[in-house]
């Protein structure tokens, strides 16, 4: 062990590359015992019965592997697991916790050092090394094993060999949330890799292959057009940009030429296509910007689509109406549109993130999706699977109890939705008469109908960056006006609050990477970005004002304002835009102007805004992120992020008090507005306008109509005396459950 870092990297890489889970665990024990020159290295992992099962060993009797199962807490291995601490002893047999297992034939080995493998606070296994002579491992050796154990826990957590979770959850794979909802269906594997299996073959007819290449491009372009049309006009309008991105790649002269050159140099068409696809995918993959990096998936999709069209492969037709979950390294839009509407109940991608086009499309289609699970092995076409897009997890081969439990959730949601339709046109008022206005949050045109269908009284937050994200360059004033007009038209007579472009941070734009930011959440985002690129902002504001014409529907909302100067600059730009448009002969009307209160610094500026703004909207997602210093998208800290933290509640109370002194109305448009516990607190604090995702409106209305304002105020007073967010949740949840609102939490 001369070069510890090098040894560590080598072991982790070797293990990560193993194909089968069992090879993985064998490689772990073999490489550790070789590197550390110990006599035994064994790996125990928690099995479905919550025992420590010996899964691999270099040194113990081969017959013991997969047979020895130590009950929880038993022996030295149990001690390591229960204390979550390394146990390093020179003579194991003398230790009071020692537990002799004859099948292992371990009596020859005297020393014992065990390390816990912990992931997300849960022990998933124990790594043990043993030597014949009675000796303690050195601190350097122990340090090496502790570091290795941390890496191995990350690698092994999604292995089918691990079952750290309680009974019935033995095949849980975690990823990131792609689109919400629960889907129970059968796996349909999407094999993306065929193109990469293609070998280079000398081309027999170069001119013929060049002609084929151009014909192929035309065929696939036409296929894409057809798939886009199959989506229906509403969806095609909102996610059509994804298809445009594909089509632009197909027309990209550099891509087309790369394949031509390959053919001219003597490679057959599939070989030249494979090289071009790999080359362009690598170019995107090397980009710093996460959105642009995610575009390498589009290149893979396209390369495979071209290859499949070349070999005349048709998508498999589903024989029956079984609910389908598409699963694969990546799932492309063509595979999605090949499944008949209503039959697709889930999507699982080994790679990708919430920024992948697959996730954007899944959201638009209302199909639950989980992204970035890492490779899931041993998947079988047709096997049952549950996709839990609400928690970013997938359950493989779920037992009947688990399926029944999830089916109950799905059914409950369905019947609740039907029941809630009955209150769609009734006011959102508490039992003692306090009226609440419920708006919808949206960003995709596909969200428009659900909002209206669920009784939204207007749009409280239109996230304009979403239409910007599905384009391939900044949309023109006319392009934007077209999209905004459709939103305003659909909500005719009701307010529509359009937020100016809020890119940066977790919302990068494909065609405008903001590079080299150490800390993007604190960087060039929201109003800071748009004021610095005021030509873009002017175009957007002009498009919004033109789209609204002389109606009084439009409200403009500014994201990430942290000082009054930014507000002043925008007001100047707004006046300018109005003047320009009037000068150009348009009938225009000054929109109401609002500020998102989401940067804590904005709160102390409210006293100066009485004459400057018409309304405030609390962005509780960012406000919580910045107050708690917790990245809202980082799964490692997700469990700590809770917007009912007393610090957040007290700041909201302060915002309401300051705004009321200035006579400025306040609404809230973050995730708090869709969390029942938070909604009780918001009512108690004094909020009367909430904006939430369209699908959440019915249940929030049900909640509001089921409680009294006085009750919400009493609970809020009690909550403000609590120290822990969990205590606040328990307090309110218990009372809501008692009031017959248990279903809100299922
Ligand atoms: C917020 O920050 O609460 C908000 C609504 O804006 P976004 O989630 O788009 O940042
Ligand atoms: Mg925000």
Image (cartoon, rainbow, N blue to C red):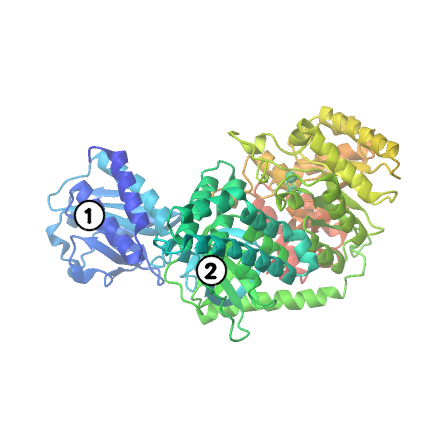
Badge 1: how crowded within 10 Å, few (<14), some, or many (20+)? Answer: few
Which residue was labeled with disc 2? 310
Instruction: Work out which residue is located at the far top of the displayed protein and give it.
Output: 565
In the shown orientation, is residue 670 left or right of residue 288?
Answer: right
Ligand 1's quadrant is top right
Give x and y (percent) for residue 245: 58, 48
Q: Is residue 679 above or below residue 587?
A: below
Q: Which mark is residue 31?
A: none
| Residue at 61% in and 49% down | 244
* Secondary structure state at the residue bearing disc 1: loop
Q: Closer to the camera: disc 2 or disc 1?
A: 2
Which residue was labeled with disc 1? 95
Give x and y (percent) for residue 424: 77, 61
Is residue 372 visible from the viewing direction of this image? yes
Give x and y (percent) for residue 144: 26, 38
Name the foreground residue: 512 vs 687.
512
Q: Quadrant of the N terminus?
A: top left
Quadrant of residue 219 within the rendered picture: bottom right
| Residue at 78% in and 36% down | 542
Q: Is residue 562 above or below residue 632?
A: above
């Amino acid at each position: 062990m001369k070069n510890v870092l090098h040894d560590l990297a080598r072991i982790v890489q070797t293990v990560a590359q193993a194909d089968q889970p069992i090879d993985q665990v064998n490689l772990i024990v073999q490489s550790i015992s070789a590197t550390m020159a110990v006599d035994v290295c064994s790996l125990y992992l928690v099995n479905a019965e919550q025992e420590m099962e010996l899964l691999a060993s270099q040194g113990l009797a081969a017959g013991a592997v997969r047979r020895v199962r130590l009950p929880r807490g038993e022996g030295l291995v149990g001690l390591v697991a229960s204390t979550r601490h390394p146990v390093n002893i020179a003579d194991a047999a003398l230790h009071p916790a020692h537990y002799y297992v004859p099948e292992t034939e371990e009596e020859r080995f005297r020393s014992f050092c065990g390390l816990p493998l912990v992931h997300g606070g849960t022990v998933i296994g124990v790594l043990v090394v043993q030597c014949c002579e009675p000796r303690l491992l050195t601190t350097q050796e122990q340090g090496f094993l502790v570091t290795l154990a941390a890496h191995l826990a990350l690698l092994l957590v999604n292995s089918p060999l691990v079952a750290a979770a309680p009974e019935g959850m033995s095949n849980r794979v975690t990823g990131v949330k792609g689109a919400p909802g629960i889907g129970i269906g059968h796996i349909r594997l999407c094999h993306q890799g065929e193109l990469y299996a293609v070998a280079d073959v000398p081309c027999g007819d170069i001119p013929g292959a060049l002609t084929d290449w151009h014909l192929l491009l035309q065929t696939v372009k036409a296929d894409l057009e057809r798939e886009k049309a199959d989506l229906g006009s509403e969806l095609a309008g909102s996610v059509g940009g994804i298809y445009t991105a594909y089509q632009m790649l197909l027309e990209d002269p550099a891509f087309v030429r790369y394949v031509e050159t390959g053919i001219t140099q003597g490679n057959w068409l599939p070989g030249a296509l494979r090289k071009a696809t790999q080359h362009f995918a690598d170019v995107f993959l090397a980009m710093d910007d996460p959105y642009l990096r995610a575009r390498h998936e589009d290149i893979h999709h396209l390369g495979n689509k071209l290859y499949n069209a070349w070999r005349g492969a048709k998508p498999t037709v589903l024989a029956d109406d079984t609910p389908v979950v598409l699963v694969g390294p990546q799932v492309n839009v063509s595979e999605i549109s090949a499944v008949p509407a209503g039959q697709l109940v889930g999507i699982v991608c080994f790679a990708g993130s919430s920024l992948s086009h697959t996730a954007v499309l899944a959201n638009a289609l209302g199909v639950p999706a989980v992204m970035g699970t890492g490779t899931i092995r041993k998947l079988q076409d047709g096997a049952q699977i549950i996709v839990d897009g609400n928690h970013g997890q997938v359950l493989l081969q779920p037992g009947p109890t688990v399926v029944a439990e999830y089916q109950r959730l799905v059914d409950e949601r369905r019947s609740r939705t039907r029941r809630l339709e009955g209150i769609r046109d009734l006011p959102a008022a508490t039992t003692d008469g306090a009226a609440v206005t419920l708006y919808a949050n949206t960003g995709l045109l596909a969200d428009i109908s659900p909002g209206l269908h669920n009784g939204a009284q207007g749009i409280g937050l239109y996230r304009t960056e979403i239409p910007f994200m599905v384009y391939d360059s900044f949309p023109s004033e006319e392009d934007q006006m077209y999209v905004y007009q459709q939103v305003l038209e659909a909500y005719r007579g009701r307010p529509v609050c359009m937020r100016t472009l809020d890119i940066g941070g977790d919302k990068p734009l494909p065609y405008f990477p903001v590079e080299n930011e150490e800390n993007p959440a604190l960087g060039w985002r929201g109003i800071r970005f748009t004021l610095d690129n005021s030509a873009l902002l002017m175009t957007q504001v002009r498009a919004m004002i033109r789209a609204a014409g002389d109606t009084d529907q439009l409200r403009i909302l500014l994201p990430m304002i942290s000082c009054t100067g930014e507000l002043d600059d925008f007001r100047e730009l707004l006046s300018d835009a109005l003047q320009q448009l009037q000068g150009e002969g348009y009938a225009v009307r000054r929109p109401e102007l609002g500020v998102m209160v989401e940067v804590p610094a904005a709160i102390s500026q409210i006293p100066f805004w009485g004459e400057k703004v018409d309304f405030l909207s609390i962005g509780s997602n960012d406000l919580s992120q910045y107050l708690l210093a917790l990245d809202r998208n980082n799964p490692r800290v997700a469990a700590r992020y809770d917007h009912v933290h007393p610090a957040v509640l007290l700041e909201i109370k302060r915002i309401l008090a300051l705004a009321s002194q200035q006579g400025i109305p306040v609404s809230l448009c973050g995730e708090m507005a869709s969390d029942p516990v938070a909604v009780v607190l918001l009512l108690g604090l004094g909020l009367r306008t909430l904006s939430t995702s369209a699908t959440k409106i019915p249940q929030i209305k049900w909640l509001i109509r089921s409680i009294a304002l006085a009750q919400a105020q009493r609970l809020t007073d009690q909550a403000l005396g609590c120290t822990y967010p969990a205590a606040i949740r328990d307090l309110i949840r218990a009372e809501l459950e008692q009031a017959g609102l248990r279903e809100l939490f299922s």
